[in-house]
Amino acid sequence: MTTATTTPIRPLTHLDILEAEAVHILRETAGEFDRPVILFSGGKDSVVMLHLARKAFAPGPPPIPLLHVDTGHNFPEVIAYRDAVVAEHGLRLHVASVQEYLDTGLLAERPDGMRNPLQTTPLLEAIESHRFDAVFGGGRRDEEKARAKERVFSLRDEFGGWDPRRQRPELWNLYNGRHSPGEHVRVFPLSNWTELDVWQYIAREGIELPPIYFAHEREVFMRRGMWLTAGAWGGPRPDEPVERRSVRYRTVGDMSCTGAVDSAATTVTEVIDEIAASRRTERGATRADDQMTEAAMEDRKREGYF
């Protein structure tokens, strides 16, 4: 008499659950909307989102193009990484250039040199011109309190604006993508992830990131309590001495408002240990554009920002 053997079932980890939820959101959106697009900056959250999209639609490539709003003051390492990923996987990339809007006079430089707040107009015009009806973003609820208010499916009006009062219930993972002509929906597959979840998933999946996410020697100067990289965007001033320090970046944005942190973490494991000991979110600690006012992010979202 033979005895049947069974393969033990591996219990799901929290990363398995988050991955399954994100894949479900990606597939649900692709099935419900006609012209979705993935916002892709080369930052860690958009890199993870693209990795999930490749999983969701395997064995074929994701049937969704990418869109990057390029400020013209992005970190060169990140732009090089973006282009390499697009070429490697044969993806379609649309680039909306803030610099082009400045050159034509449609936008004007800010006195503080920040270009992140200038991304809204190129983003909205790219959405309108390509008729995108669903826009995937890498925003997470743990990043910032305005993002904590936002649903997975976030309805935007005909001007791209966000109204918290129009947020819809999402019981039992049922997402309502109904929208009127001219409106679109922002979709956030990583809503329920934390920064630590993102890095643990990067470790598990062996995802490659731009090198600035790891400790490296860099010339930086101090402004508003953050280490910024010198560049043509307007820094440093005469009273801001440049130092060479071992730093890394927790988030990636415009060079004028994205600060580095002192770090010796050169591996994913060391970064995870560093994040686990941190008591501040990456945006709260290293993004000057979120510190302009108490409601800076919410104000920008009402205007059509990410």
Image (tube, helix red, strand yellow):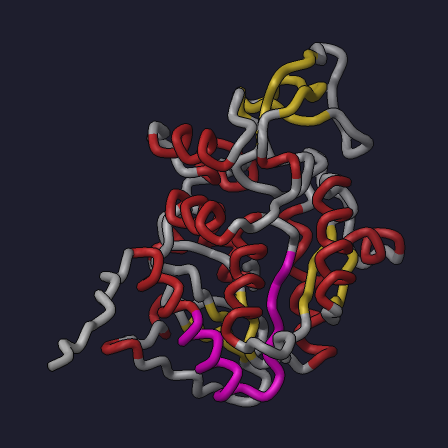
- Tell me if residue 35 is in the magenta stretch: yes
Give the farthest residue toward the left. Answer: 1
Residue 240 appears anywhere in the view? no
- Tell me if residue 55 is in the magenta stretch: no
Residue 277 appears anywhere in the view? yes
Q: Looking at the image, which residue is at 31% across and 81% down?
A: 174
* 241, 41: nearer the viewer: 41
Quarter of the figure that contains the N terminus:
bottom left
* 257, 212: nearer the viewer: 212
Q: Looking at the image, which residue is at 44% across and 87% down?
A: 178
Question: x, y percentage for residue 13?
Answer: 28, 57
Q: Looking at the image, which residue is at 39% across and 30% down?
A: 273
Give the farthest residue toward the right. Answer: 103
- Looking at the picture, does residue 145 appear above or below residue 249? below
- Looking at the picture, does residue 119 appear above or below residue 164? above
284 vs 263, left or right, is: left
- Looking at the picture, does residue 58 appear above or below residue 72? below
Question: x, y percentage for residue 51?
Answer: 55, 62
255 vs 87, left or right, is: left
* Quarter of the view holding residue 21: bottom left
- Looking at the picture, does residue 159 appear above or below residue 272? below
Give the farthest residue toward the front. Answer: 1
* 186, 128: nearer the viewer: 186
Numbered range of the magenta stretch: 23-40
Question: x, y percentage for residue 296?
Answer: 48, 46
Question: x, y percentage for residue 49?
Answer: 53, 61
| Count of labels in the image | 0
Q: Looking at the image, which residue is at 58% across and 73% down?
A: 159
Quarter of the figure that contains the C terminus:
bottom right
